[in-house]
């Protein structure tokens, strides 16, 4: 078993089986110390710190994960942790950077709406809502399966 797998299993065990979040965070901290470029370690550590009520430390880990792997998910986590740490300006800067990089997801869209609400920015909120109206709904491929079926009795 690889060391990252062992750290992941051990932290999951403490979190999910024993319910010991402090011990889980301790293991995640060791994982980050041994593998500082491991985005999964940093993302999990950020989540754990957030659960333990340490929003500033959680933000630091999320920020570093986004630096290591710039992607919609890591930026979304960074923005979310910024909002939880009451760093609205950092959240806005991160949103702007994510959009400039072309990242897009439902999660980022939701965070943009939250940010506009927190800033009481009606213009941005209106723009975000307008963007939502322009989005085409996903096709429902299972629609025929949802129609009631009629069975015919064989004629005799």
Image (tube, helix red, strand yellow):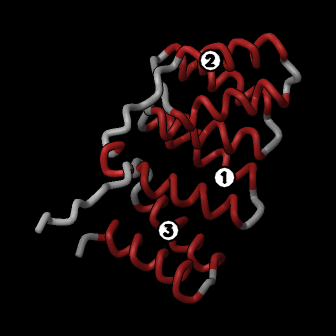
Where 143 sits versus 29, above or below?
Answer: above
Residue 30, numbered circle = 3
Q: Secondary structure at mark 2?
A: helix
Residue that label 2 marks: 96
Q: Earlier in the sequence, mark 3 or mark 1?
A: 3
- Image location (x, y in percent) of residue 101: 47, 17
Residue 116, numbered circle = none
Q: Earlier in the sequence, mark 3 or mark 2?
A: 3
Residue at figure coordinates x 63%, y 76% from the top left: 21
Residue situated furthest bottom in the rendering: 18
Q: Check whether the beta carbons of the residues at disc 1 and disc 2 lie within 8 A of each other.
A: no
Q: Secondary structure at mark 1?
A: helix
- Image location (x, y in percent) of residue 35: 40, 57
Residues packed near mark 1 inside 10 Å, few (<14), some (14 to 19) or many (20 plus): many
Eye-nearest disc, 3 or 2: 2
Question: Which of the two residues, 118 or 58, is positioned nearer the viewer here?
Answer: 118
- Image location (x, y in percent) of residue 151: 25, 60
Q: How far apart are labels 1 and 2 at the CA level?
A: 21 Å
Residue that label 1 marks: 58
Q: Secondary structure at mark 3?
A: helix
Residue at figure coordinates x 42%, y 62% from the top left: 34
Eye-nearest disc, 1 or 2: 2
Q: How far apart are labels 3 and 1 at the CA level?
A: 15 Å
Residue at figure coordinates x 47%, y 33% from the top left: 72
């Amino acid at each position: 078993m690889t060391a990252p797998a062992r750290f992941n299993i051990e932290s999951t065990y403490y979190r999910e089986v024993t319910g010991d979040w402090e011990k889980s965070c301790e293991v995640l901290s060791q994982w980050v110390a041994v593998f500082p470029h491991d985005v999964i370690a940093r993302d999990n550590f950020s989540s754990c710190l957030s659960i333990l009520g340490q929003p500033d430390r959680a933000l630091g880990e999320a920020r570093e994960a986004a630096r290591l792997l710039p992607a919609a998910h890591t930026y979304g986590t960074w923005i979310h942790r910024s909002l939880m740490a009451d760093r609205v300006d950092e959240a806005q800067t991160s949103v702007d950077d994510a959009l400039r990089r072309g990242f897009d997801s439902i999660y980022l869209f939701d965070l943009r709406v939250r940010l506009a609400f927190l800033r009481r920015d009606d213009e941005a909120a209106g723009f975000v809502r307008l963007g939502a109206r322009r989005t085409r709904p996903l096709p429902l491929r299972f629609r025929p399966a949802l129609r009631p079926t009629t069975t015919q009795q064989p004629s005799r």
